[in-house]
Image: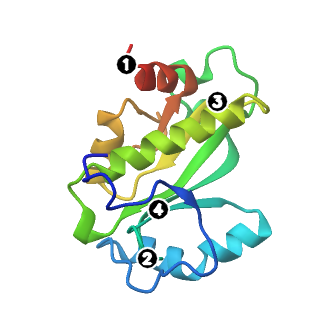
């Protein structure tokens, strides 16, 4: 993350006392999900949400959520479906958003890196072939493509990143 050291806390699991009210990513669906659904999903185990806070506050400035899932082979790019069973186990990056005041500082890529690291850790104890995301827009799709995600042959806004490629991406190889 390009943000000055010390201004933000590293990503951590969401907590009930986090300040979600002022979060504004510019995408109302992402803002509303954070405020209305993230804590319910956390409590039920439907997904896990990780937040970045401004240092010294509980104000959320960025977040992402992860959940396990599966995808049909026909919906997967060739590299993801090769030699895999039906369905293919994936980690779903359900949401990723940065408050408008913090956009353009590398937080999105930093959050994606953290999500990849957590997915790689989960893959050590359970089978996960790829990280899957449903992009909300063409701009979001371009962000994920820039980070190495491949487009689904069925849905142009569904993208996947094989974990082997993700590991190489993180190691710089």
Q: Which is in the foreground here, disc 2 or disc 4?
A: 2
Using a 10 Å C-alpha cutoff, classify the residue at mark 3 as few (fewer than 14 neighbours), some (14 to 19) or many (20 or more): some
Task: Report the Cα–Cα distance between label 2 and label 3.
Answer: 44 Å
- Residue 153 is situated, as x and y percent measured from the top left of the image, at 46, 33
Using a 10 Å C-alpha cutoff, classify the residue at mark 1 as few (fewer than 14 neighbours), some (14 to 19) or many (20 or more): few
- Residue 169 is situated, as x and y percent measured from the top left of the image, at 41, 24
Q: Residue at x 66, y 34 (%)?
A: 121
Image-based side of 32 in relation to 110, left or right: right
Position of residue 158 relative to residue 126, above or below, is below
Q: Are marks 4 and 1 in contact (CB under 8 Å)?
A: no
Image-based side of 2 in relation to 118, left or right: left
Residue identified by numbered label 2: 57
Q: Residue at x 24, y 61 (%)?
A: 103
Q: Residue at x 69, y 70 (%)?
A: 41
Residue identified by numbered label 4: 63
Image-based side of 65 in relation to 32, left or right: right
First reached walking from the N terminus: tag 2 or tag 4: 2
Res. 172 mark: 1
Say whether residue 158 is visible.
no
- Residue 86 is situated, as x and y percent measured from the top left of the image, at 75, 29
First reached walking from the N terminus: tag 1 or tag 2: 2
Q: Are marks 2 and 3 in contact (CB under 8 Å)?
A: no
């Amino acid at each position: 993350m390009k943000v000055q050291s010390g201004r933000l806390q590293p990503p951590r699991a969401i907590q009930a006392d986090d300040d979600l009210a002022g979060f504004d990513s510019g995408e109302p669906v992402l803002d509303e999900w954070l405020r209305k659904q993230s804590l319910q999903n956390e409590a039920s185990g439907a997904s896990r949400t990780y937040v970045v806070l401004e240092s010294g506050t509980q104000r959320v400035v960025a977040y992402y959520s992860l959940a396990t899932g599966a995808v049909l082979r026909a919906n997967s790019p060739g590299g993801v479906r090769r030699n895999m069973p039906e369905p293919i186990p994936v980690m779903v990056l359900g949401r990723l958003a940065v408050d408008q005041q913090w956009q353009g500082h590398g937080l999105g890529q930093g959050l994606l890196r953290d999500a990849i690291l957590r997915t790689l850790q989960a893959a050590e104890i359970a089978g996960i072939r790829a990280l899957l995301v449903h992009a909300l827009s063409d701009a979001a799709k371009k962000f994920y493509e820039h980070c190495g995600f491949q487009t689904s042959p069925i849905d142009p806004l569904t993208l996947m990143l094989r974990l082997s490629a993700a590991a190489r991406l993180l190691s710089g190889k």
